[in-house]
Amino acid sequence: MCGRFSLFEDISSLEDQFKFDFRDEIEMRYNIAPGQEILAVIDNDEGRIGKKMRWGLIPFWADDEKIGYRMINARAETVDEKASFKDALKQRRCLILTDGFYEWKKEGKHKQPYRFAMKDKKPFAFAGVWENWNKDGKDIASCTIITTSANEIVGKIHDRMPVILPKEKFEVWLDRSLNQASDLKKLLVPYEGSFMEVYPVSTAINSAKNEGKELIVPLNSL
């Protein structure tokens, strides 16, 4: 699964790397938690645009927005079968921008958090799907991160990992004219582990109330 991640890269740098337009501001975040606002990239037929969304997909048919807290991840194996995600997979796909994510491993009597990032320190993109929800005067755009089986790096800590899309697959993933689930699911595979790094971080990351650059510092450097 993926339950926490970060994004603290400058917005102009993100726009340049991921080729999208965004006419707003975002905060530097080191500890993004479910239910909070994230930055996603979609294609609106005129090009790529950035869009703020709530992390935790709220299906359009849901009566209560709180269902989103149970929809932070969608399994690649069944994303085309679940009522909450199958329409979004065909029509509303997005890139969820990040520069690292966290997982926990039980070590003795406690769980140790680890941070996963790219060796080149650059941001990357999770595969996501999104939805618009309208009810009782509220209009919420929300999304979920698709997960797959872990590669050799993440597998040392957890058996699942978010789907990380390589740059050359962005255009295909965002192309709304492509809607065959069987073709789309071919993209939902573990990322090449040789490009990734992992290291332990402070348990301060455990609390969604904590923020700051110190959360990404390797544990042995504190």
Image (tube, rainbow, N blue to C red):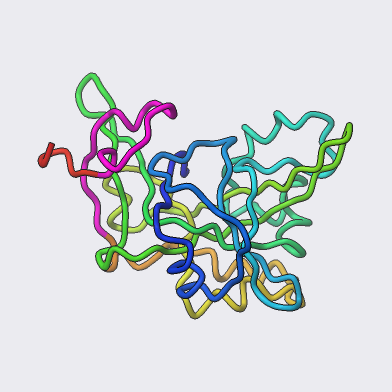
User: What residue sits 39% from the left and 26% below the top?
Assistant: 207
Frontmost residue, 199 versus 155: 199
Q: Position of residue 146 (x, y in %)?
A: 56, 53
The relative height of residue 47 versus residue 121 in the rendered view (above or below) is below
User: What residue sits 21% from the left and 41% below the top?
Assistant: 200
Residue 207 painted magenta: yes
Q: Residue furthest right?
A: 136
The relative height of residue 11 versus residue 17 in the rendered view (above or below) is above
Q: Position of residue 5 (x, y in %)?
A: 42, 45
- For the C terminus, which image quadrant? top left
User: Where are the magenta residues, as a range?
Assistant: 197-216
Q: Position of residue 65 (x, y in %)?
A: 75, 32
Q: Position of residue 216 (x, y in %)?
A: 27, 44
Q: Is residue 41 left or right of residue 122?
A: right
Residue 162 painted magenta: no
User: What residue sits 70% from the left and 28% below the top?
Assistant: 66
Q: Is residue 130 left or right of residue 210?
A: right
Q: Quadrant of residue 80?
A: bottom right
Q: Is residue 221 left or right of residue 34?
A: left
Q: Residue furthest left?
A: 220
The tally of labels here is: 0
The relative height of residue 82 versus residue 13 in the rendered view (above or below) is above
User: What residue sits 78% from the left and 49% below the top?
Assistant: 132
